[in-house]
Image: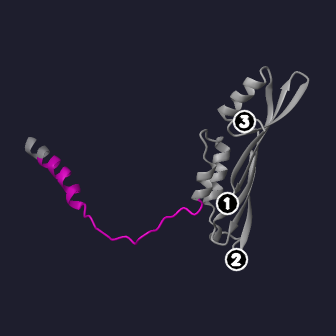
Amino acid sequence: MKKLLLSLLCIGFISPMLAQVIKTEELSEVVVYATNYKYLNSLKSQEPAAIPVQMLERKVAAFNLENSDYYQDDYDYYQIRFYIPDGKILAAYNADGKIIRTIEKFENVKLPESVNNALLDRFPGWVVSEDVYLVRYHETKGVDKTYKVTLKNGDKTLKVKMDDKGNFL
């Protein structure tokens, strides 16, 4: 009985090993390149942007113009709009699918720590009621990031404009 169980156990382990035949195939070469890496790299800062902002900016960078319904060989550049509930981006692409410029607007997103700290230092006792994050990207001029913040303290209202590093403009 022991020999029978031991032999069945050995057959159970050995038969799946013999059934596996490994085929080797050579795959075709794939070239991966990032067309809009300059756009994403220029938007990076010491403090990351809010998650909805990052998600939409990645969608803009990953958009494949040549596979879209808008693409035709006749045009030199294309303007594509991207929307989410928190904001929107208007992006201009050249015929190769590279981002030339963008205009971005996001409302009531999480402020970076540097902006929050600068507001607390300069306006103690004030509360942020709403904010607007604006980004302008141009492939030759670079990036301009600004925050327009509305502060409230009781009945008083104050509007402040800042850059992404916490400097008042």
What's the image's color scheme?
one colour
Position in image of residue 128 (x %, y %):
79, 29
Q: Which mark is residue 11?
A: none
Q: Earlier in the sequence, mark 1 or mark 2?
A: 2
Q: Which residue is mark 3?
A: 167
Q: Is residue 20 magenta?
A: yes
Q: Residues within 10 Å of mark 3 (few under 14, many from 20)?
A: few
Work out which residue is located at the far left of the displayed protein and give it. Answer: 3
Give the residues in magenta: 7-36
**Position of 143 relative to 49 (above/below):** below
Viewer-closest of 79 and 101: 101
Q: Residue at 88% across / 29% down in the picture?
A: 157
Q: Earlier in the sequence, mark 1 or mark 3?
A: 1
User: How many numbered marks does the figure carry?
Assistant: 3
The quadrant of the picture occupied by the C terminus is top right
Q: Is residue 70 magenta?
A: no
Q: Residues within 10 Å of mark 1 (few under 14, many from 20)?
A: few
Q: Earlier in the sequence, mark 2 or mark 3?
A: 2
Q: Of the residues shown, which amino acid type is indicated by label 2?
A: Gln
Q: Is residue 144 left or right of residue 36?
A: right
Q: Is residue 13 visible?
A: yes
Of badges 1 and 2, the one in the foreground is: 1
Displayed quadrant of residue 15: bottom left
Work out which residue is located at the far bottom of the displayed protein and give it. Answer: 74
Q: Quick check: marks 1 and 3 in contact, CB under 8 Å?
A: no
Viewer-closest of 127 and 46: 46
Q: Which residue is mark 1?
A: 140
Viewer-closest of 121 and 80: 121
Q: Which residue is mark 2?
A: 72
Q: Secondary structure at mark 3?
A: loop
Q: Residue at 65% across / 52% down in the picture?
A: 57
Q: Residue at 90% across / 25% down in the picture?
A: 156
